[in-house]
Image (spheres, coloured by chain):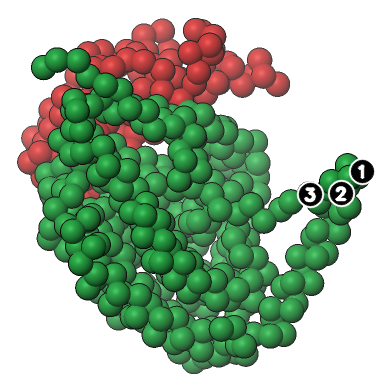
């Protein structure tokens, strides 16, 4: 082989808006090898957690990712609660599952939109993100925040879902279901998307096993794994649902799995809300006095796959070791199989196909006057403004279009 | 899954196992010497098709603890291999020849804890910058004391 051209993507990804660096070694149009560099954004979260109390760690791990900001607290709660063997109240289990599934719907919509954007198909991007907005507003109504919901605590949840809000949520979901059906139909029947995604960046079941890939990436290659079913937690044993899989292993199959999973999530939330009504006014948390010495390993199925938390306690009020494994850590390594052999233009969508995680929570801004350079609003005023907006959304409720 | 039967089977197959313990619901911890790590990994990953999850590394009183996590997705059990390396000899064989995807986490452990993985295909810095000092490993207990 003659000379190879290095095509860099990064260190700041132009589309993912996240620091990561792909080095594509190309022979003409074809990618023959690739390298990946990371660590630009290493924050030492595991180390930070060791200096926090068990209770405070929830708010740290929530900030690992802005999109799956409930899956990390979910896995951490499963890990910590397994040390003393706490059984949480049914109502807390249901609320946890509702928040988790609602997150899956908004995360998958985000991915579908981004995938469209990566292909240069911005209509899909606009649609998907428009339909995602009412879901985020619903989060604000239920939890007070669009992201980083601060719902979880040791032994249960921090806020209840009132009957009024439950009705609102059901209405928004039924609306969203209609729109998602429309979007699914449009995406699955589109000849351009077929031409662009079918047979591209195929991962076989063996590739998945070799790299330990998980979530929709694995399920699209016919590997039938889902922590919600295999190692059940929260309310997933109490409701009827099925694991979506596809055989092909290409990017189209990954899109199909994610689109179909949204319907399952909506069905899970609907069943949970019905059970919540029956449960009436139960407790939402139990008091956990202390975490005894021991090891706790918690897992949760995030939109991108299994989140893994390992917590070691020595009987004090903070963990001595807290290991976190986000799903993208195992999925991104599959790029070596999916990108090599393809063309450069396919690499752009192939690197996005596993839905690598990034943050979209930049809602906090400082407002300056251009002429004088004076600060027009400070943090306290912005928080007030944000709370006013939440109140407005709550009052408006179901009028969302 | 009949865990007692399984524990007995595993002990018969690998008599060098130090001891086995069910830590809590559906979590099995197997303490082994580093000499049998490769055989047992191969047995779990290739024969039993367990899924590779991750490796946890920590500095404890006994030495550097490496915990290799594997998941049996048919039963929901999480199987863990615990290897303790003495503080004065932090060296172990790399498992990349058996589990392809383990490459990254071994490089990460090299960075944070300074454990040497023998025969690793790419023993380079993973998380930390090239300018990070050679002998500074932030996850070592000693480092924490100095830090405070």
Which tint was used for chain A?
Answer: green
Residue under the point 66% across and 15% down: B146
The chain ID associated with circle 2 is: A
Contact between marks 2 and 1 (CB within 8 A): the answer is yes
Residue named by callout 3: A366
**Along the line of sight, the residue nearer the viewer: A371 or A138:** A371
Q: In which quarter of the image is the N terminus of chain B?
A: bottom left
Q: Position of residue B62 (x, y in %)?
A: 43, 21
The label shown at residue A129 is none
Say if A334 sits above or below A360 in the image.
above
Residue named by callout 1: A372
Q: How far apart, in angstroms, are the residues tagged by discs 3 and 2?
A: 10 Å
The chain ID associated with circle 3 is: A
Which tint was used for chain B?
Answer: red
Residues at marks 1 and 3 on the same chain: yes
Element type where label 3 sits in the image? loop
Q: Is residue A185 visible?
A: yes
Q: How far apart, in angstroms, are the residues tagged by discs 2 and 1?
A: 6 Å
Residues at marks 2 and 1 on the same chain: yes
Query: Badge 3: how crowded within 10 Å, few (<14), some, or many (20+)?
Result: few
Residue under the point 18% across and 25% down: A27
Q: Quadrant of the C terminus of chain B?
A: top right
Depth check, mark 1 against mark 3: the one in front is 1
Residue named by callout 2: A369
Residue under the point 54% across and 33% down: A41
């Amino acid at each position: 082989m003659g000379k190879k051209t290095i095509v860099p993507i990064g260190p700041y990804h132009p589309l993912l808006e996240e620091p990561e660096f792909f080095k594509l070694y190309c022979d003409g149009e074809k990618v023959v090898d690739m390298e990946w560099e990371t660590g630009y954004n290493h924050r030492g979260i595991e180390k930070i957690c060791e200096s926090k109390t068990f209770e405070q760690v929830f708010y740290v791990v929530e900030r690992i990712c802005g999109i799956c900001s409930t899956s990390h607290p979910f896995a951490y709660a499963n890990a910590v609660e397994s040390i003393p063997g706490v059984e949480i109240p049914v109502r807390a289990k249901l609320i946890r599952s509702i928040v988790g599934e609602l997150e899956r719907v908004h995360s998958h919509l985000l991915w579908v939109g981004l995938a469209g954007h990566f292909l240069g198909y911005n209509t899909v991007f606009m649609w998907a993100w428009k339909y995602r907005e009412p879901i985020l507003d619903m989060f604000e109504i239920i939890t007070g925040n669009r992201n980083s919901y601060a719902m979880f605590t040791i032994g249960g949840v921090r806020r209840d879902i009132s009957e009024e809000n439950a009705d609102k949520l059901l209405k928004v979901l039924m609306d969203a279901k209609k729109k998602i059906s429309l979007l699914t139909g449009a995406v699955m029947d589109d000849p351009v998307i077929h031409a662009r995604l079918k047979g591209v960046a195929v991962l076989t079941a063996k590739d998945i096993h070799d790299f330990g890939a998980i979530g929709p990436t694995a399920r699209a290659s016919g590997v039938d794994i889902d922590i919600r079913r295999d190692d059940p937690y929260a309310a997933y044993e109490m409701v009827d649902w099925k694991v979506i899989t596809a055989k092909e292993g290409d990017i189209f199959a990954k899109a199909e799995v994610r689109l179909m999973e949204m319907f399952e999530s909506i069905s899970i939330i609907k069943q949970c809300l019905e059970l919540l009504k029956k449960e009436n006014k139960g407790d939402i948390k139990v008091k956990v006095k202390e975490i005894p010495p021991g090891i706790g390993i918690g897992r949760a199925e995030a939109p991108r796959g299994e989140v893994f938390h390992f917590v070691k306690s020595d009987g004090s009020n903070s963990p001595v070791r807290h290991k976190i494994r986000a799903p993208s850590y195992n999925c991104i390594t599959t790029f070596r199989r999916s990108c090599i052999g393809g063309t450069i233009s396919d690499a752009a969508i192939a690197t996005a196909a596993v839905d690598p995680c990034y943050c979209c929570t930049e809602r906090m801004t400082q407002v300056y006057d251009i002429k004088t350079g004076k600060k027009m609003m400070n943090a306290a005023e912005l928080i007030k403004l944000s709370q006013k907006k939440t109140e407005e959304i709550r009052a408006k409720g179901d009028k969302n279009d | 899954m009949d865990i007692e039967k399984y524990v007995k089977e595993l002990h018969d197959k690998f008599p060098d196992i130090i001891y086995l313990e069910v830590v809590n619901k559906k979590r099995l911890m197997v303490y082994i010497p580093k000499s049998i790590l490769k055989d047992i990994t191969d047995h779990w990953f290739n024969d039993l098709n367990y899924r590779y999850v991750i490796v946890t590394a920590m500095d404890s009183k006994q030495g550097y603890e490496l915990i290799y996590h594997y998941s049996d997705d048919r039963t929901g059990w999480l199987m863990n291999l615990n290897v303790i390396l003495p503080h004065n000899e932090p060296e172990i064989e790399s498992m990349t020849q058996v589990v392809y995807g383990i490459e990254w986490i071994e490089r990460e452990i090299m960075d944070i804890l300074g454990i040497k993985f023998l025969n690793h295909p790419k023993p380079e810095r993973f998380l930390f910058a090239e300018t990070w000092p050679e002998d500074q490993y932030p996850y070592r207990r000693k480092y924490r004391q100095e830090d405070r």
